[in-house]
Image (cartoon, rainbow, N blue to C red):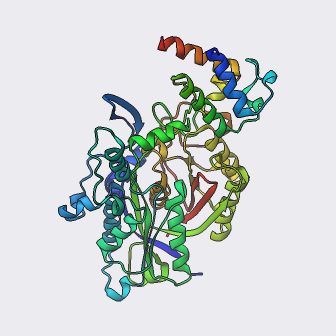
């Protein structure tokens, strides 16, 4: 099977609006979390969140087009434009037809839907919805806008599997490249879910932290939602080397599994199987793995289950390698999470650096791995794993190796 | 019906247990309710009594062990409401 490599990177995140700024913040352990305020029935409702700050869509698109795009699509176009520029590709019409645009999102244009429905159902509202409600909301709008912005006319679609969407999209693109169905892909995930309705929905599940996200830590009390997009240009290694492209890292193997057990609680067997399958697909043994970028949501049950699964899949190696959760910095961006964390993983592998798990207060016996508490460090990384586990029991693990 | 009876009524409906088994000493884990349905149960109590309970699934093992803990939290929130 041909090897698949990453030749372009782009990102919009709570801790950086480009790859260089993101890397600096990620390695330094900066928190992107803040207390967000929402007006509601004459009051102010507060929620912790990790918002993207100072994002200007006009840097990436015609000002007259902005109103056609929900915030999640704006993020997707911005990150994809960066990634395409970074790849150095300048594709002609025939090559564009052989390029896939495969993007994950959990909730698509939820902000558009919420605003329109607010106007409709609120007694004080105009009763008139925005005329672009449907094309802004549709979850495939992000992939559409990326294909239009870059002129990519090959297969284009959206993958929606909650918190695994971004990684499922990348795994799908990787397989389409392996089989020769396409020659290159623009892939990743995008999400803009920091709306009052979404936050209230998550609050209803009683899994939200009252302040910050503390993955694997004692006294952790749940997740904090984030937003953003991360996009990647994928090519077959042979093609990338032939054109002298800069190769950031290699996607060495992908594992997927379904728990088929509980809608919201992770399952040890299902998660372990995804880890094992990724190693097998990459033809790596646990001893080859030098770093794990964990799903690490900061909930009691995810972090304990993920710890147990890593021990089961990697054996003693699980206790010997750094395992950190970048959600401690930029929150849980749902459908973009797998892609944002893939960016963290790729940079960790490329730069030989283990990013920290911040907001860490102390050890929890159920999470007894080296979680790189609060301070990142230099660490030689030949290969790494990136985990994404979704509601619905849908698991994804990507193995990344140094190019 | 007192407000505590209302709580026990909701617990009975959700757990489908015999009412005699539903006493303040009953441990939540012994109600035979999944963690998701427990969240729904807490929401039902909040709706019925017009209060908000500080129930977090991540820390419930510490804060909400028994039905008595739920009742105590309900009483506290009702008192605060006045």
Q: Quadrant of the N terminus of chain A?
A: bottom right
Point out the residue furthest to the bottom here.
A94
Q: Nearer the viewer, residue A318 or A12?
A: A12
As drawn, A59 above or below A15: below
Residue B2 position within the rendered picture, expressed as x and y whole percent measured from the top left: 63, 14
**Is B59 on the left or on the right of B33, as rendered?**
left
Where B29 sits versus A131, above or below? above
User: Residue at the spot x=65%, y=34% of the render?
Assistant: B38
Left or right position of B4 against B19: left
Residue at horizontal 43 percent and vertical 79 percent from the top: A240
Decide if residue A402 is in sight here.
no
Q: Quadrant of residue A187?
A: bottom left
**Foreground residue among A115 and A276:** A115
- Looking at the picture, how far across and down is residue A251, in whole percent? 53, 69
Instruction: Answer with the quarter of the image where residue B64 lies.
Output: top right
Up-down relation of residue A252 to residue A35 (above or below): below
In this view, the residue in front, B10 or A398, is B10
Number of numbered markers: 0
- What x and y, as percent, mark residue A110? 40, 52
Q: Is residue A159 visible?
A: yes
**Can you give x and y, in whole percent of width and height, for residue A89 in the image?**
33, 78
Left or right: where A78 falls relative to A314: left
């Amino acid at each position: 099977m041909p090897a698949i490599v990453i030749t372009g990177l782009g990102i919009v995140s709570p801790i950086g609006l480009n790859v260089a700024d993101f890397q600096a913040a990620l390695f330094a352990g900066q928190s992107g979390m803040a207390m967000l305020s929402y007006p509601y029935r004459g009051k102010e409702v507060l929620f912790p969140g990790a918002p993207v700050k100072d994002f200007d869509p006009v840097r990436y698109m015609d000002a007259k087009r902005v109103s056609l795009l929900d915030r999640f699509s704006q993020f997707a176009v911005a990150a994809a434009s960066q990634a395409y520029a970074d790849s150095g590709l300048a594709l002609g019409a025939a090559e564009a037809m052989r390029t896939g645009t495969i993007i994950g999102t959990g909730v698509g244009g939820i902000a558009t839907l919420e605003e329109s429905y607010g106007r409709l159902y609120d007694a004080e509202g105009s009763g008139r919805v925005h005329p672009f409600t449907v094309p802004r909301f549709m979850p495939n709008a992000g992939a559409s806008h990326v294909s239009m912005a870059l002129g990519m006319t090959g297969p284009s679609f959206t993958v929606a599997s909650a918190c695994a969407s971004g990684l499922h999209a990348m795994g799908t693109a990787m397989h389409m490249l392996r089989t020769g169905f396409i020659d290159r892909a623009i892939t990743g995930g995008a999400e803009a879910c920091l709306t009052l309705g979404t936050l209230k929905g998550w609050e209803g599940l009683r899994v939200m932290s009252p302040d910050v996200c503390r993955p694997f830590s004692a006294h952790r009390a749940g997740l904090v939602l984030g937003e953003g997009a991360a996009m990647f240009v994928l090519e077959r290694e042979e093609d990338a080397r032939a054109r002298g492209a800069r190769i950031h890292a290699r996607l060495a193997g992908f594992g997927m599994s379904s728990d088929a057990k509980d809608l919201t609680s992770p399952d040890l067997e299902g998660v372990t199987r995804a880890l094992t399958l990724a190693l097998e697909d990459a033809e790596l043994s646990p001893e080859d793995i030098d770093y794990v970028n964990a799903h690490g949501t900061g909930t009691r049950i995810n972090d304990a289950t993920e710890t147990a699964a890593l021990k089961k899949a990697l054996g003693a190696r699980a206790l010997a390698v750094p395992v950190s959760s970048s959600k401690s910095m930029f929150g849980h961006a749902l459908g973009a999470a797998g892609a944002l964390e893939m960016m963290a993983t790729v940079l960790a592998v490329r730069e030989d650096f283990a990013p920290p798990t911040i907001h860490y207060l102390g050890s929890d016996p159920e999470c007894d791995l080296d979680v790189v508490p609060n301070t990142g460090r230099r660490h030689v990384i030949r290969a790494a794993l990136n985990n994404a586990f979704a509601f619905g029991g849908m698991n994804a693990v990507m193995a990344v190796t140094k190019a | 019906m007192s407000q505590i009876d209302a709580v026990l009524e909701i617990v009975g409906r959700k757990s489908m247990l015999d009412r005699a088994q539903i006493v303040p000493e009953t441990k939540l884990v012994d109600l035979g309710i999944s963690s998701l349905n427990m969240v729904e149960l807490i929401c039902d109590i909040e709706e019925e009594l017009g209060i908000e309970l500080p129930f977090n699934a991540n820390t419930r093992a510490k804060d909400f062990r028994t039905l008595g803990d739920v009742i105590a939290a309900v009483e506290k929130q009702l008192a605060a409401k006045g």
